[in-house]
Amino acid sequence: MRTLLVVAVASLLMSIPVKAQRGGRGQQQAAAPPRPGIECFEQLTTPEYPQAALKERVDGSVWTTIQLSAQGAVDKVDTQVVSAFSEGARLLAPAVEKAVRASKFKSECAGKTVFVAFRYQEAGAAVPDPKVTSSKEPPNVVWIESQPPLETAAKSKPAAKSQH
């Protein structure tokens, strides 16, 4: 249910209003060009799925606006987190910002503002040592998926009561 909520909100946020240019009579309206996204990365460092987020089973989307300097370096990173969990912003946003700052950008994107959504999601059954995978969905979505960690037997069993 929470994944459906996150996807619904993400879809709503992803819709980009189309700006029209009005010309003279008989001219067609032109759509605004798409906002720069994944294509601006020369080398994208994949954000980690923080262990605390895995442990607490926190997922969500980190909407990222990256302002590049005239030299193509990261000037400013703004994030907005959409998550059904109150800890989503605290756990997910720092990993994304760290990865963005470690990434390399193409020179033709220097001076531009780049928009990318990083979507964290747990998938599948719990495993002892979950592996994180990532995939890109152009123009501006990066999926970070991991199976949830397996709970230890000691944590999942209630303490045994002593019998007298």
Image: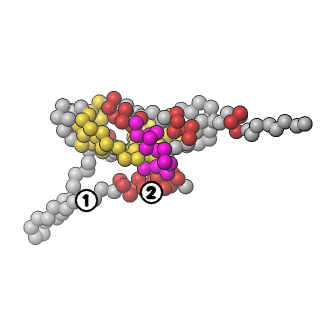
Tell me the quadrant of the picture where the N terminus can be found.
bottom right
Q: Residue at x 9, y 67 (%)?
A: 24
Relative horizontal placement of residue 84, taking residue 124 as reference (left or right): left
Residue 64 can be seen, yes or no: yes
Q: Position of residue 89 (x, y in %)?
A: 43, 44
Specify how the rendered protein is coloured.
Answer: secondary structure
Residue at label 2? 8
Of residues 39 and 9, the one nearer the viewer is: 9
Please give the label number shown on residue 18: 1
Q: Are marks 2 and 1 in contact (CB under 8 Å)?
A: no
* Circle 2 Cα neighbour tier, 10 Å, few/some/many (<14 / 14–19 / ≥20): few
Mark 2 / mark 1, whichever is N-terminal: 2
- Residue 63 against residue 73 in the figure, above or below: below
Q: Residue at x 45, y 53 (%)?
A: 7
* Circle 1 Cα neighbour tier, 10 Å, few/some/many (<14 / 14–19 / ≥20): few
Secondary structure beneath dot 1 equals: loop
Q: Looking at the picture, which amino acid does disc 2 mark?
A: Ala
Q: Position of residue 105 (x, y in %)?
A: 27, 33
Secondary structure beneath dot 2 equals: helix
Give the mark toward the camera: 2 or 1: 2
Among all residues in the image, which is located at the extreme right? 164
Q: Position of residue 114 (x, y in %)?
A: 27, 42
For the magenta stretch, what is the residue range? 82-94
Q: Residue at x 88, y 37 (%)?
A: 163
As for residue 93 lying within the magenta part, the answer is yes
Q: Residue at x 62, y 38 (%)?
A: 126
Among all residues in the image, which is located at the extreme left? 24
